[in-house]
Image: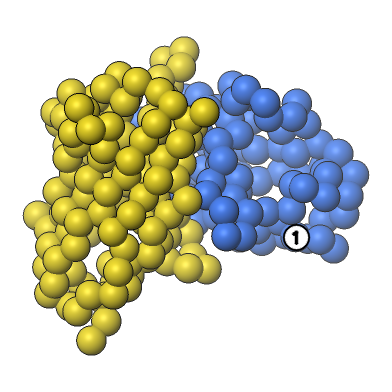
């Protein structure tokens, strides 16, 4: 069974840092690109970041570029999101999602349950 | 690439046919996915590549379009279909989502 379990969400002050983790099981992690997506409770989905299966070519939303860093440890089957210089507007539930390539298209076919990050003084 | 959806919400009855529209600010070819999300749950992919149905998704869901204009259609709306629907482009990063369309019970 494919499972993605996020952790690391917490209450943090503006300007602070946090590292999210996404532990996966049930599939060969090293073969898949991975995403982070966030959602302010009651609002829409916002794509945050993507990393390729070998850890190369990280990509970020403009709103987090230069502050967030996506990484992965394929030996530990874990995806990370290092979040620095946090802002109040970074408050959201953060989801990790697996990107599957099928017939020429990518889709996020498995998602974690989300972890809540609250940035507040 | 900016994604818009219309309507932002709609009310429908069981058995209805529902159509949600998604528009991209520039051409995205067929790199368009649709997701369903229920309250308190993670999103679930319904359709990828504009019209390919994800495994296990009922055939009452269908997608169409190309370029900049896309449509999600739900035929014979079922009680479990009341949810919020999002389109997402995967043509280029950032892989933007539309703002969502909430389908609720009339």
Image coordinates of residue B96 in percent, x first then y, are 37, 46
Using the image, name the chain to which the residue with label 1 belongs. B
Query: Which residue lies at the image location 27% right of the left edge and 81% below the top edge?
Result: A120
* A118 w.r.t. B83: above or below: below
| Residue that label 1 marks | B104
Query: According to the rendering, which colour does chain A have?
Result: yellow
Task: Determine whether, in the image, residue A36 is placed left or right of residue B103.
Answer: left
Q: Secondary structure at mark 1?
A: strand
Q: Is residue B3 visible?
A: no
Query: Which residue lies at the image location 74% right of the left edge and 47% below the top edge?
Result: B81
| Quarter of the N terminus of chain B within the rendering | top left
Task: Determine whether, in the image, residue B47 is placed left or right of residue A4.
Answer: right
Count of labels in the image: 1
Q: Give B65 or B94, whichever is nearer the viewer.
A: B94
| Quarter of the C terminus of chain B within the rendering | bottom right
Image coordinates of residue A98 in percent, x first then y, are 39, 33
Q: Give B74 or A26, whichever is nearer the viewer.
A: A26
Q: How is the image coloured?
A: by chain
Kindly indicate the quadrant of the structure image that contains residue A118.
Answer: bottom left
Query: Which residue lies at the image location 19% right of the left edge and 62% below the top edge?
Result: A18
* A64 w.r.t. A11: above or below: above
Q: Give A25 or B14, whichever is nearer the viewer.
A: A25
* Number of other residues with Cα within 10 Å of mark 1, as a class: few under 14, some 14 to 19, many 20 or more: some
The extreme top residue here reads: A103
Image coordinates of residue A12 in percent, x first then y, are 23, 75
Query: Which residue lies at the image location 64% right of the left edge and 30% below the top edge?
Result: B63
Q: Is residue B47 visible?
A: yes
Image coordinates of residue B71 in percent, x first then y, are 62, 37
Query: According to the rendering, which colour does chain B have?
Result: blue
* A82 w.r.t. A107: above or below: below
């Amino acid at each position: 069974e494919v499972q993605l379990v996020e952790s690391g969400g917490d209450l943090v002050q503006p300007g602070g840092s946090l590292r999210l983790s996404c532990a996966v099981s049930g599939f060969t992690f090293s073969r898949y690109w991975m995403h982070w997506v966030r959602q302010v409770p009651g609002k829409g989905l916002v794509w945050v970041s993507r990393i390729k299966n070998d850890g190369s070519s990280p990509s970020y939303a403009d709103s987090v570029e230069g502050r967030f860093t996506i990484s992965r440890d394929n030996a530990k089957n874990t995806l990370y999101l290092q979040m620095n210089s946090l802002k109040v507007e970074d408050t959201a539930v953060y989801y990790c999602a697996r990107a599957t390539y099928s017939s020429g298209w990518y889709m996020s076919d498995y998602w974690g349950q989300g972890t809540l990050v609250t940035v507040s003084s | 690439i900016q994604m818009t959806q219309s309507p932002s919400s709609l009310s429908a009855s069981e058995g209805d046919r529902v159509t949600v529209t998604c528009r991209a600010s520039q051409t995205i070819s067929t790199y368009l996915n649709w997701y369903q999300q229920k309250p308190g749950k993670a999103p679930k992919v319904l359709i990828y590549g504009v019209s390919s149905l994800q495994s296990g998704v009922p055939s009452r869901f269908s997608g169409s379009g190309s370029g900049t204009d896309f449509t999600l259609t739900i035929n014979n709306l079922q009680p479990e279909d009341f949810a919020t629907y999002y389109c997402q482009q995967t043509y280029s990063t950032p892989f933007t989502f539309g703002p969502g369309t909430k389908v609720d019970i009339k």
